[in-house]
Amino acid sequence: MSQPTREKILDAVFKLVYINGYNGTSMAMILKECGIPKGSLYHYFKSKKAMVLAVVSERINPRMDEFYQLNVEESQEGIDTLLAAILKVSKKELLVSYGCPLNRLNQEMSPVDADFEKAINNVYNRLRDKITLLLENSQLQADVDKVSLSEFIIATVWGSISLSPTQSSTSRYMQTITHLINYLKSLKV
Amino acid sequence: MSQPTREKILDAVFKLVYINGYNGTSMAMILKECGIPKGSLYHYFKSKKAMVLAVVSERINPRMDEFYQLNVEESQEGIDTLLAAILKVSKKELLVSYGCPLNRLNQEMSPVDADFEKAINNVYNRLRDKITLLLENSQLQADVDKVSLSEFIIATVWGSISLSPTQSSTSRYMQTITHLINYLKSLKV
DNA sequence: TCACAAATAGACTGTTCGGTCTAACTTTAA
DNA sequence: TTAAAGTTAGACCGAACAGTCTATTTGTGA
């Protein structure tokens, strides 16, 4: 009976912090969002910071795998899996409107809190390594550095979805990201 | 005698909000940073929000021109001016460590405040139009869409400097951005 | 020299912040 | 049946928040 409450809290915190940021989200907002008394909340988490760090590892980290769907379709060339994942981002409305939750939290918290910086870096490194692996399982031109190409891909996707949250985002994303796709295709042998 | 005080305030607010974000910067921090009494501060600005909006137009907006140095060297091809500007970003330590101030503020404030969203978009649109103009003054392959290419460039540069603020940033930026430069060069006729 | 406006100064206010505390309810196992 | 543990409940706390207010000092033109 204790799991649902904890999970409900994590869902509410993820949603609120994603949109409003860490400092823009108050405990009162969280309490209201999940309709849970303060005592319960502090029974599961010792502080606001601990709560959001739990969101990083238990909500954002798993979502990385889900959004970028890097596990499936192992029969394909790695880079084709990757291209499909990049296109699939356009289907995620929140992602395209508000940007990457990890990137948002990173920009807000990493400069001012070492614990956040570390936790966020762990998730980022996992993602980058996974993409690097996919690139290594691809027929690419020999002189291409797989690690920096991974970072280039992440930077471009994250950058694209971080430009002006409110403008008609899906078509803008598709237009912008076409250049990335062109470049990646040009690297195939 | 009134200019210096106002300018001092804007400088302090820009610096603090750049690093700590809007919600992470308190009036007390601002007061301490610029060593000015509260009465003076509220004499020049009617609210914290008005102060930061002034920073957008009077500090961040001018910096766009400065950082991306798009006015100079008009003798060159537009795209060469642009390539030089992209490389020059690596020289700006704060920029490469903390990301673009406009992008940071955009991600924090645009989703929750229409006034910020509007002000930030104005600055962004000016930058994009300027880059588009440079691209139009270049010998590029005929089928290249200049506007979406501008947004791709901004997205990639901003994305690159937003990845993990604390890691050794200049060399990482250079490695990542090399892919962008390769792509842009491939578009030249 | 004086009057008026601009600017400085900081004590003070009401509200909201994250977090604590005690009490009570519910579940579980003996 | 009962005692202990797990969980719910929300009143309460001091600190920090953005912003107000009145008083004083400084600069300026007549």
Image (spheres, coloured by chain):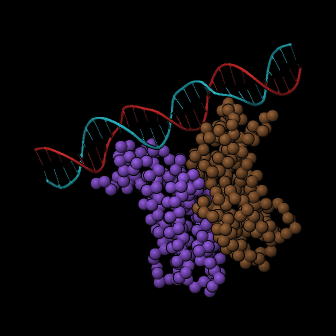
Chain colours: A brown, B purple, C red, D cyan
**Looking at the image, can residue B149 be seen?**
yes
Q: Position of residue A161 (x, y in %)?
A: 64, 62
Q: Residue at x 47, y 50 (%)?
A: B49
Q: Nearer the viewer, residue D11 or A110?
A: D11
The mark tally for this picture is 0
- What residue sits 58% from the left and 85% below the top? B139
Q: Position of residue B90 (x, y in %)?
A: 55, 67
Left or right side of B6 for B17: right
Q: Residue at horizontal 49%, vertical 74%?
A: B70
Quadrant for residue B11, please give it. bottom left
Side (left or right) of B19 relative to B171? left
Q: Quadrant of the N terminus of chain A?
A: top right
Work out which quarter of the rendered image holds the C terminus of chain A and state it: bottom right
Compared to residue A148, the image places residue D23 above or below, namely above
Report x, y in % for residue B189.
62, 86
From the top left corner, tell me how far across and down residue A27 is, in percent: 62, 38
Q: Nearer the viewer, residue B92 or B44?
A: B44
Instruction: Report the residue at 83% width, 70% height from top.
Output: A77
Please indicate, yes or no, whether residue B85 appears anywhere in the rendered image: no
Q: Is residue A45 above or below residue B183?
A: above
Q: Nearer the viewer, residue D9 or B140?
A: D9
Indicate whether B70 appears above or below A20.
below
